[in-house]
Amino acid sequence: MQQHILTLRIAYEQDVVLARQRAVVIADGLGFDRQDTSRIATAVSELARNAFRHAGGGSVRFAADHRHLLIEVNDQGPGFSRSPDAPPPPAGNPQSRGRGLTGVRRIMDLFELTTGRDGTRILVGKALPAGQNAPAPGLIQDLVRRLCQQHPQSPYEEIQRQNQELLTAMASLRQKQQELEQLNRELTDTNRGIVALSRELEEKADHLQQVNRLQAQFISHLSHEFRTPLNAILGLAQLLLDGADGELNHEQRKQLGYIHLAAKNLADMVNDLLDLARIEAGKMTLRVTPCSAGQLLSTLRGMLKPTLNEKQRQVELVVEDVSDDFPLLETDGGKLAQILRNLVSNALKFTERGEVRVRATYDRWLDQVSFQVVDTGIGIALEDRERIFEEYTQIDHRLQEQVKGTGLGLPLSRKLARALGGDLTVESTPGRGSCFTLHIPRRLQKLSDREAP
Ligand SMILES: Nc1ncnc2c1ncn2[C@@H]1O[C@H](COP(=O)(O)OP(=O)(O)OP(=O)(O)O)[C@@H](O)[C@H]1O
Ligand SMILES: [Mg+2]
């Protein structure tokens, strides 16, 4: 149901101004915001001016239903045939009602046009502000009272007010434009940053590739440059020790022994370093061959027993025999021996009395082999148990000063264990001893039938 608010007659130019002023008061009274009020006033002013100019006058009626503020403009003029959607006719054409009406249609929510030889009726509407249903009758009465009390402003004042509205609108537009420009600038900067960042990343990737290449080159150079002279020193020292150049006196033999030992230590260290570098660079090759755990352990015993020095007379190296039905391993026997050598030599280094025991077990169910190196040595504190697998880590202890080492044995052993498809772990009780466990699959699958990581 419609509630009537006000009807105005348009007979003179001032009535157009009055209609606009009334539209502002009504829209404001119904709670429209500034922008919508301004749109409603513009529409009313446009329609009233049309009626005055093209039909010699008419009427403007304001009403409200439960959804819209409605404005109906009627005239008894000659009507017009153009659709308000058609392009505007040239300026000066008395029928030029198109442009204004198109604008009105755009800024209002409802637009109905009926035109004929005996007049035109245009109904426009604006949806009431959000959350507002039909305005309460009290509100309309109040509005009507306010409208009756208002004196019409002079056209001059109205133009001034409109000017101010225009200026405010322009200022807000300018601010919006500035905000947009600022946003644009920020976007351009961000874009530039992203481009620079991706270029930097590309450069870094190139650089890394180059470093990788250089590292691989370095490794192959080092292995040649270091190992060849070291092997020469070792070989020649051994020859002299064997008396190839005549008998040596006691002092010469002793000094040559030191040279040989130092060269041997250096060779071990260089080999560990090269192995680590090779693993890091993904250049390590595995040679899978059938090997017997029993043989591997007896070689280990033969190799390490003589290294027990004077002070370690109270330490016994026990290598348990493997059972007769222990299956053959298919793995890289060289790497496996290298890991066990490291573990046993550590155990011997850090055990003053008691024993170092090595045993191998086979888990048929998992088809997995475990090697354990158990000692009765100084043990490792809980907080150090993972650290010892990091390069160059050695734990402070009285014994540490008496033994040789660089802190590469365990990190290398763990990497080798993982390369063999297994792992290396430790359990320990400080002051009582440690137990290092290496477990690997009995059969190392070749790369081709190994699952991609
Ligand atoms: N069986 C063990 N008992 C007690 N401490 C150990 C034992 N094995 C290793 N550690 C500790 O872990 C450290 C690291 O061992 P790792 O084998 O990596 O180096 P290293 O034996 O000192 O030198 P390298 O093996 O390079 O000759 C040792 O220095 C020692 O402090
Ligand atoms: Mg070691």
Image (cartoon, helix red, strand yellow):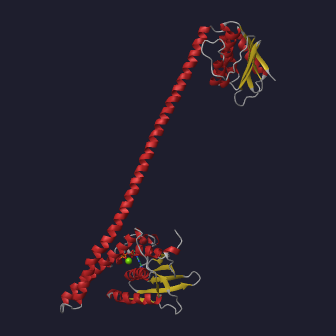
* Residue 300 to residue 418: above or below: below
* Residue 432 to residue 55: above or below: below
User: Visible in this render: residue 150?
Assistant: no
Q: Position of residue 424 (x, y in %)?
A: 47, 76
| Number of marks | 0
Specify the farthest residue to the top. 12
Q: Position of residue 120 (x, y in %)?
A: 74, 15
User: Visible in this render: residue 412?
Assistant: yes
10 sits to left or right of 399: right
Q: Position of residue 195 (x, y in %)?
A: 43, 46
Q: Nearest the camera: 445 or 426?
A: 445
* Residue 148 to residue 125: above or below: above
Specify the farthest residue to the right. 1
Quadrant of the displayed image that contains ligand 1 = bottom left
299 sits to left or right of 423: left
Q: Position of residue 266 (x, y in %)?
A: 29, 77
* Residue 331 to residue 213: above or below: below
Quadrant where the image shows the N terminus = top right
Q: Nearest the camera: 65 or 393?
A: 65
Q: Report which quarter residue 38 is drawn in.
A: top right
